[in-house]
Amino acid sequence: WHDKLLGGFRRTSDRLVGNLAGLGGARLEEHTLDEVEEALIGSDLGPETAGRVRARLAEGTFERNMEELGIRLVVAEEVEKVLAQVAKPLGIDAFPRPQVVLVIGVNGSGKTTTIAKLAHLFLEQDYQVMLAAGDTFRAAAIGQLRTWAERIGVPIVTGPEGGDAAGIVWDAVKKATEIGTDVLIVDTAGRLQNKRELMDELAKIRRVLGRLNPAAPHDVLLVLDATTGQNALNQIEVFKEVAGVTGLVMTKLDGTARGGVLVAAAERYGLPIHAIGVGEQMDDLRPFDAREVSRIIA
Ligand code: GDP
């Protein structure tokens, strides 16, 4: 997975080198600082972090031929500081059980796969897991989730295509409570095209959950596709408004040079980042580790 991530990210600071010859023992010149800052912003890192890196570089001096290393180190340190604030594994601590995890995100973001990965992860941690197929809008989504449930070996509550998602959630919570499930992971429709309907549907699911357990949903996870870059940031904006997001999972970090968006998201929204997706298989979910990721980005 480490190689996959590395191959995907393509180090942000690779874009920086090549302009740095002959600076030995000197401060970096203005135009070099400009270039570094622009390259970082171009990597979706966000203007705040890029600005802080620039300010630190402006103060330092670099030995000849050590400029690249020096810059990488500063970028890594600044990135780690930002990411450390939001790196937070998803804990299972709800009482009474089950902990209800609502999973939201636009179609194609990797929502279904992430649900499967989370189920697998919790199962490995010896928790009892159940899935609820609350994305009734797409028949394919129900089928896909059922296939994953069978493969992983967890029970799933489904309904007919076009059925009432809130009804499925109601049934699922009842059943989960009955059999002592620890975690109930709920898929939801990702129709951002129709914000009103999506909002109503999520609100209805919340009402139903609240009637069964006032603390539910305990988590509202937004799944974001890192390859969409800045778009991912817009999605946070919209879903925060329609769904009250409590945390993020960023997918497809194995296939993109745009992982810098993680930093921009952390900086701008401060939402916990629980995990990252680094592939299509059920064990391709990594807990989000600020140090590890900052060393890979930089
Ligand atoms: P959904 O429409 O949001 O439920 O998205 P899916 O879970 O069906 O995922 C869409 C596509 O992205 C599928 O082909 C997945 O295999 C793929 N995918 C999901 N997560 C990852 C990931 O972390 N890395 C890669 N490379 N592909 C992923």
Image: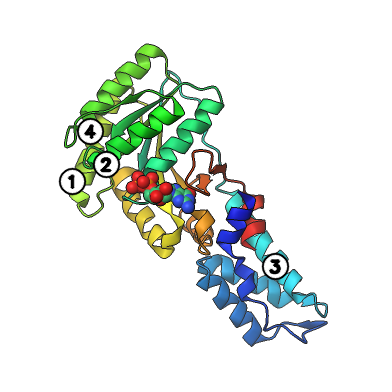
Residue in the picture at 70% in, 71% down: 71
Instruction: Indicate the quadrant where residue 25 lies.
Output: bottom right
**Residue kind at label 2, given as amino acid type:** Ala
The CA span between labels 2 and 3 is 44 Å
Q: Report the residue marked by disc 3.
A: 72
Q: Is residue 205 above or below residue 174?
A: below
Q: Assess disc 4: are there few (<14), some (14-19) or many (≥20) residues with their C-alpha within 10 Å of its C-alpha.
A: many
Q: Residue furthest top?
A: 178
State the SS at label 4: helix
Residue in the picture at 73% in, 75% down: 59
Q: Report the residue marked by disc 4.
A: 165
**Residue kind at label 3, given as amino acid type:** Arg
Horizontal side of 180 relative to 138 (left or right) equals: right
Residue 100: tell me if it is visible.
Answer: no
Q: Assess disc 2: are there few (<14), some (14-19) or many (≥20) residues with their C-alpha within 10 Å of its C-alpha.
A: few
**Residue kind at label 1, given as amino acid type:** Glu
Q: Report the residue marked by disc 1.
A: 197
Name the image quarter holding the C terminus.
bottom right
Residue 214 in percent (x, y) is at 33, 25
Residue 118 in percent (x, y) is at 47, 35
Q: Report the residue marked by disc 2.
A: 140
Of the residues under marks 3 and 1, which one precedes in the sequence? 3
